[in-house]
Image: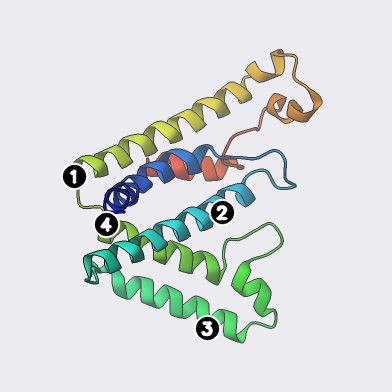
Amino acid sequence: MNKILPSLFKFLEYSPVVLAVVLPLLFVPATTEYFETAKVSFFYIFTSLMFVVWGIKMVYEKRVSFVRSPLDVAFALLVVGFALVTFFSPNKYLAFFGGYLRFVPSLAFVLGITVLYYTVSSNLRDKQIRSYVVICYVLSVATAAALALLSYFGVFGLAKLPVSLAFLGTSSFNTVGSLSGLCVLAASA
C-alpha cells in the first residue's frame, strides 16, 4: 500500500499536463454534440478524480494542505454570484447544470473550475511540471489550430472518408467546436 500511494500522488502532480493536452483536442463524434459534451464530461470526471486523490493525500499525510492566493476572493464572489443566480432562477436545474448539451455557464461548471484551481494550485509545486503544463498546452492548441487550417484548406476533403467521418471534410471543422473558441485558446497559449 505504501508503494501505491506515492505513485497515486505523482498522478496528482502530472494531471494538469493531461488536462492541458486532452481538453483542446478532445471531441467525440459518437454523441449529438461532438465538442462540449465530451470536454466537459472529461473535465468533471478527471477533476473529481484529482479531488479524491488530493483528499487521500491529505488523509495519508495527516494534514490539510490548502494554498491561499489573491484569487480566493474572486473565486468566492464567482461561486456566490452563480449560487444566487441559481437560487433565484425560475429554472434551477438549468441554472445549476446548464442547458441541453451546453454546460457553460452553470453553477456546476463554476464549482468544477474552482475545485480544479484549488486542487492544482495546492499540489503543483514542481517548477519543471509547471513548464510541462505550459508546453503541452501550447502544443495541444497549436495542433488544434493546425487541424483547423488543414480542414479550412480542404485537405481532409481530398481523402475518401466514410460517412461517419464526413464532418472532417467541412471547411469549418476544428477540435474546439467554434472558430471563436479556437481563437480564444490560441490567444491564451
On the image, the x and y values in percent for residue 140 come to: 43, 34
Tell me the residue at 62%/45% (across/down): 35
Q: Are marks 3 and 4 in contact (CB under 8 Å)?
A: no
* Residue 171 visible here: yes
Q: Amino acid at mark 3?
A: Leu
* Dot 3 or dot 2, earlier in sequence: 2
- Does residue 188 appear to the left or right of 7 in the view shown? right
- Looking at the rendered structure, the secondary structure element under dot 2 is helix
Label 2 crowd (10 A; few <14 / some 14-19 / many >=20): some
Identify the disc placed on residue 84. 3
Distance from Cα at disc 1 to Cα at disc 4 = 12 Å
Distance from Cα at disc 1 to Cα at disc 2 = 27 Å
* Dot 3 or dot 4, earlier in sequence: 3
> In the picture shown, does residue 186 fall above or below 15?
above
Q: Which residue is mark 2?
A: 40
* Dot 3 or dot 1, earlier in sequence: 3
Identify the disc placed on residue 127. 1
